[in-house]
Amino acid sequence: MSNSMFYTGLSGLNVAQAALVTTGHNTANVNTAGYNRQTVQVASNGGLYAPGVGFFGTGARATDVTRSYDQFLTTQLNQAQATNQSLTTQYTQISQIDNLLASQTAGLAPLMQTLFAGVQAVVNTPADPAARQQLISSGQAMTNQFRSMSQYLTGLNANVNDQITGNIDQINTFSSQIASLNKQIALLSNATGGQAPNDLLDQRDQLVSNLSKLVGTKVVVQDGGQYNIFIGNGQTLVLGDKASTLKAVSSAADPSQTGVAVVGASGVPVELQDSVLAGGALGGLLQFRNETLSDAQNSLGRIAIALSDTFNAQQNLGVDLNGALGQDFFTQASPGIISNSRNAGGLVLTPTIADSSQLTTSDYRLSVTAGPNYSLTRLSDNVAMGPNGVPPFPATFSDADFPITFDGVTLTADNTIPAQPGDSFLIQPTRTGARDFAVVLTDPAKVAAATPIVTGNTAGNLGSGAIGAGTVSAAYLGTPLAATATLTYNKAANTLSGFPAGSAVTVTLANGTADPASPYAAGVPVTYSAGATMTFDGITVSVSGAPSNGDKFTISPNTGGVSDGSNALLLGALQNQKTIGGGTATFNDAYAQLVSAVGNKAQQIQISNAAQTSLTVQIRSVQQSVSGVNQDEETANLLMFQQMYQANAKVIQTASTMFDAVLGIRG
């Protein structure tokens, strides 16, 4: 019996020692990231039968050391971290654009107002060289800021590319380490008869946790306890002890952007769509670039193109101090088009601006199918576009439909070398608008402040008829007035004659309706109607009142508009005209919409991130309540196991004393 008692005490001593070692291990790792609390599992050794008495226990044994681990909570925490990190990354990036656009000193709104204030100064004193120079200087300051903003956004894009590359390197490091741990865990488990190497399991779970902060992952536990990890829409990152390699590549659709590719077994990288990589810092960067950064660049570009286009158009309709027709004031960017680097065909596409007021802030993708046929998609809302720019749009169209016009852009095609199915093209109508915006007119004398025509009543007129100041349209540039046109009133016929030979005249009555006889053929006298507007060769004039027979009215080329600021007045009116977004917004409106959109997006992400951070903290708290080390609890355990150790040592001591006593009796 004493011998049995000795081994019983010894077994308890071993269990107590194992528990003390495990508790000490827990205490040592209280601040170790990813560590899960470990517990010694104890089982009874069973009993020995004593005839006529029954079974006597033989102590205890340590059967396993397990970790307090909940797969469900760990998966929840990884998913929450992935979303949290994605939102944090997005907010960090978008706040930089928000701060730039909303700045009172770096913003564009004050500079656009200064430009039009300079125009108004020319209206007031068209002959003043200082006012003209100030207008040019205001334009230069404004375009410099447009280009500076564009450069800043381009720098953000480069920074995003660098971060994507860095994240990919970290992902590869983590995935290879996880694959290595998979192998070690399998080997050790097999060598120990299925015993779990807890500390290696913790290391692997911590690597998965770190990986989830970089990209959204899905973990599948296979037989043997190895992890298979998938990203995106099912791309394998880790399969047992094998890790796939991700690679940062220049995007085939847009070389200015870094894409993510998976290197296949053949060693050829296959680029993934940005949209499939959600979650984590990498997903946040891709989402920011595609949803906010690109839209901000396009929005700035659209404002620059619309401002340049409308200002130049009106400037060209005026005359400068030398009497010459106006020249472009600003440069204007051309739409960009990028042929996918994997294209097999030779189709050449050329986009041009057809109507700057119809431009959107979206990019477009032209895809080639069999035939060849084509489909055009507006990427901002994935709406199919058509060859005529008017919905409903056909799903596909053919070579015969070119040139096509859509959202203010005309696209022509040279299919000398046909396109091949699978080819695609990225069309960016406004991406470089701000980058290529500059003042090209530097001579103050060439500011076209005057209208190219001068109207007047001759000195001998007897009636009350008067001709108003005329205006010109773009059609005037094709047939500018070469000499004075004198309109003579015939009272008997109630007509005006004397329009330039070969000029047909269109008449709109004062009530806004068309003259029933309009348009009048060239050389045919025009029926006089007080207040009606008469348009010919791009010139529009109006005669009102009651002229007498033979009264004359002149329309002459303006060869010296020194004191004429009438065209500058029309330039100034552009500030309040809705020339953007299909006639829905002014320049300032469009900029305010951009500032508001970015600000609202930043606020939305900030609120979502705050909520997600709170959720992540809660899940981590629950997970730690299950798996974390509680120092107070471990201290209590140390005391308990120490007492257990001492008690079992006392059992051994008692057994030894009893054995010595037995020997003494026998002696």
Image (cartoon, helix red, strand yellow):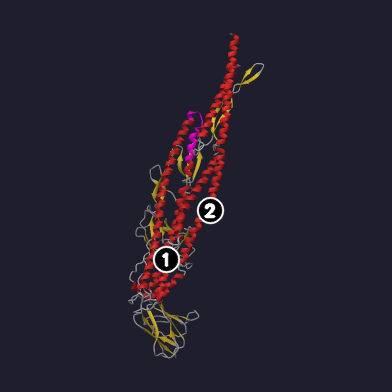
In the rendered image, residue 140, in percent from the top left (x then y), is placed at 37, 66
Rendering quarter of residue 45: top right
Q: Who is closer to the viewer here, 385 or 241?
A: 241
Q: Is residue 222 magenta?
A: no
For the question of whether residue 434 can be seen, the reply is no
Dominant SS in magenta: helix
| Secondary structure at numbered mark 2 | helix
- Region of the chain picked out in magenta, as a range: 190-207
Residue located at (51% from left, 58% from top): 600
Residue 196 colored in magenta in the image: yes
Quarter of the image with the N terminus in it: top right
Q: Which of marks 1 and 2 is nearer the N terminus?
A: 1
Say which element carries label 1: helix
The amino acid type, in three-letter code, at marker 2 is Ile
Does the image show residue 213?
yes
Residue bearing the label numbered 2:
607
Q: Are marks 1 and 2 in contact (CB under 8 Å)?
A: no
Residue that badge 1 annotates: 111
Task: Give the image location of residue 36, x and y in percent.
Answer: 52, 36
Q: Quadrant of residue 301?
A: bottom left
